[in-house]
Image (spheres, grey):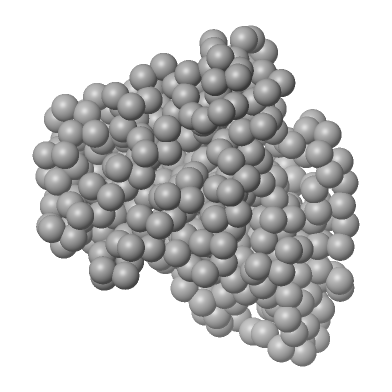
Amino acid sequence: MSGILIRGAAALGDHTEDLRVRDGIIVERGRLSVEIGERVVDGDGLIALPGLVDLHTHLREPGGEASETVLTGTRAAAAGGFTAVHAMANTSPVADTAGVVEQVQRLGERHGYATVRPIGAVTVGLAGEHLAEIGAMARSSAQVRVFSDDGQCVHDPLIMRRALEYVATFDGVVAQHAQEPRLTEGAQMNEGVLSGELGLAGWPAVAEEAIIARDALLAQHVGARLHVCHLSTAGSVDVVRWAKARGIAITAEVTPHHLLLTEQLASGYDARFKVNPPLRRDEDVQALRAALADGTIDIVATDHAPHPTEAKECTWAEAAFGMVGLESALSVVQRTMVDTGLLTWTDVARAMSSAPAQIGRVNGYAEPFAIGSPANIVLVDSSTERAWSLDDLRGRSVNSPYLGERLPGRVMHTVHRGVSTVVDGALVDADLVVAGHEEVARG
Ligand SMILES: [Zn+2]
């Protein structure tokens, strides 16, 4: 028997209770006494949240192993309190066939740090010209439900229409990277006064907002679900709010970095702050926070985008777009949304666990700590604060915008399907995680 008793943690930051985990399942909650053979986790002073679910992770494998692998990326995920991640399709080869998505899913299963749900490409090679094998990926053992050309926008309206029609037949969703390509050719940062002063090509807000508006109308026209990746502007919030008011089946995500950082950071030409979509104005940050608080934006997703050092330690124009974010996501959300009074921990559990699981059709996350559900649990110490350092980055890449920044909160324990992946703030060794899952499987 593999059992864990989590004692005295504040469930969803609210009432204190004990949770009993056995054979990978939450079997009991309330005031509980230790049973023989159980490992006790002291949750005193900690907040218990359901395991976090990321709808937007770049794991880079296959093909980008110098930046990240399924193993290193899921270790970073566990360190950040995630128990499930959706792996973006812009790998090499691209995840546009059943073979690639099954390979990625198998690697996640083998390592056991987090459940890996592959995202399938919308178009072959992300080239935007021909639909990928969407049906074959959906029917594969990976059971893909989310499709995205992320990194690229599905800009051809007819291709987008066909993709929406196709995924609607099996309850899938298209996750759009909303970036009108002609309006953003050569773009380097948010378009505005500052981009003019810095001499960097501007990235207008309308390039994002126009695609979201078009796709919302297409989704309505064909009766499909649309998910919008990484909203970054106040105008995008307005468009999503309008679409929801019309009853369109649209969901939207915001990244932690767009909830905290602004375009001002570009003025040092430090490429750690170069990201797609770009950091925007303070008014945009405030609008994104308000939209997450009022439910216009459904979820937080990391857009964890690892890059090797040489892709960032170069000129701004040459540098790659993207930031790592799995390890820091919950801390940034605590700082921007919880410590500001905009969200409760119950709201955080929805925005970072049950709602992304619902969009991605991941089972077992509908109700936090439900008896009989898979034991995916994270325990957080929200009372602590520290300067973010290289020790906090557990993936293969270190392109974090928060190094040296003080951030609140610390993930102390992560449990994935009944197996501890983080204990007392430290990652559990890979062989012990594998052995833990084998023990759970034996029952
Ligand atoms: Zn993207």
Image quadrant where residue 327 sits: top right
| Left or right of residue 395: residue 425 | right
Image quadrant where residue 99 sits: top left
| Left or right of residue 51: residue 170 | left
| Left or right of residue 4: residue 235 | left
Classify 414 as above or below 124: below
Residue 139 seen anywhere in this rendered image of the structure: no
The percent position of residue 109, horizontal first and vertical second, equals 48, 47
Count the marks: 0
Classify 59 as above or below 54: above
Q: In which quarter of the image is the N terminus?
A: bottom right
The percent position of residue 41, horizontal first and vertical second, equals 81, 68
The percent position of residue 181, horizontal first and vertical second, equals 31, 27
Residue drawn at (36%, 44%), measured in percent from left and top?
209
Residue drawn at (78%, 83%), measured in percent from left and top?
16
Residue drawn at (80%, 86%), measured in percent from left and top?
33
Q: In which quarter of the image is the C terminus?
A: bottom right
The percent position of residue 88, horizontal first and vertical second, equals 41, 38
Classify 351 as above or below 422: below
Q: Which one is in front, 430 or 360?
A: 360
Q: Which one is in front, 194 or 30?
A: 194
Residue 20 seen anywhere in this rendered image of the structure: yes
Residue drawn at (71%, 88%), measured in percent from left and top?
30
| Left or right of residue 296: residue 44 | right
